[in-house]
Image (tube, rainbow, N blue to C red):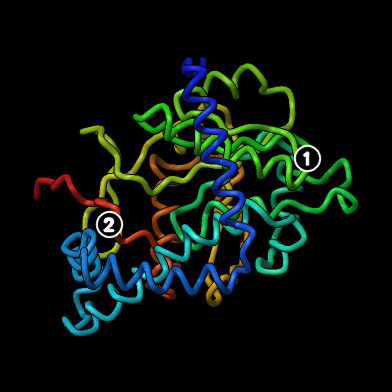
Amino acid sequence: MYRRINPMKKFFASVVYCLLYVIGLMPLGVHHFFSSICAFVIGKIFRYRYSVIVTNIARSFPQMKYEEVKSLASKYYTHMCDLFVENFWNLSHSASALRKHISVSGVEVVDELQEKYNHVLLVMGHCGNWELVSAAIIPPEKRTEKSFAAHPVYMVYKAARNKFSDLIFKKLRMSEYKKFQFSGEVLESKQVLRHALKNRDSKAIYVLISDQNSIGVHDPIVNFLNQKTYMLPGPEFLASKLKMPVVYLRMDKLSRGKYHIEFEKITEEPHEMEEYFVTKEFARRLEGDINKNKINWLWSHRRWKRNIPAD
């Protein structure tokens, strides 16, 4: 069940949504101009999570010199601010406008797997601008019964502790469903298994961002970016439990405001694979993408705040 929200909070959430919509009406170039200013302020003046960013980069790329690490950190602030302003811009602009900035390939991989298995699990990392992933949805006039976009798509997320913030995020994400004219909803991570079991006979797509910091002491451990890393067990468990094929969703940043989305099959039979195969494959592909485009990941996230014992 969704958490109950105070009516007053709902009202203020609507007010905030309207304000963001008005802000988003500005051209994308103007948004990027303000992004550059914000990046300078939070990076050079406030130095937001500077030690976290530098430490994460240095540990992930031990071959990099300190000046290179600082340069990458500086560029990251611009990338991080771009993510925010692009989401504001996206809120106020049409689906066709967004598609001009995002190219897509490999959609047929998902279509074919859904036709065969009904449910498909898409796993992705915090690469590119993950909030714009709805641009991968085929336009309504080009959809057929075999298009995955013709069936519900569920964006899975971890609920924010603050109910007001959580409500804002839901409103922002649900606006994508209306804009791109597809069915489904945003779904809290705790609800996914029950929801999928209840609807296992109908076609659906579940999208999980799977590179968050895990908190379980028995979670799988992989070698990721030159360090042992705890990984979320949820995607692997869900895929194996429901025998759902797993697809890796790659989102690469081509240039400022330009992205490419690609779908790549990991496995059709996760329940038949060796233990943690899906987790390891996801980590391997995500690591490869980060190595190719180092700026294109969420370096300000405290991803390694738990040390793993040597044994």
Q: Amino acid at mark 1?
A: Glu
In this view, the residue in front, 137 or 90, is: 90
Position of residue 107 measured from the top left corner of the image (x, y, whole percent)? 72, 56
Identified at 58% across, 32% down, the residue is: 243
> Compared with residue 188, is residue 212 higher up or lower down, i.e. above or below?
below
In this view, the residue in front, 206 or 83, is: 83
Question: Is residue 271 at all visible to an observer of this figure?
Answer: no
Position of residue 277 measured from the top left corner of the image (x, y, whole percent)? 43, 46
Residue for badge 1: 115
Contact? badges 1 and 2 (CB < 8 Å): no
Q: Which mark is residue 223?
A: 2
Identified at 31% across, 61% down, the residue is: 299
Choose top left, top right, bottom left or bottom right for residue 54.
bottom left
Q: Amino acid at mark 2?
A: Asn
Choose top left, top right, bottom left or bottom right for residue 25.
bottom right
Identified at 48% across, 15% down, the residue is: 4
From the viewer's perspective, tell me whether residue 113 is left or right of residue 174. Answer: right
Question: Is residue 233 at all visible to an observer of this figure?
Answer: yes
| Mark 1 vs mark 2, CA separation in Å | 34 Å
**Dot 1 or dot 2, earlier in sequence:** 1
Identified at 43% across, 60% down, the residue is: 286
Q: Residues within 10 Å of mark 1 (few under 14, many from 20)?
A: some
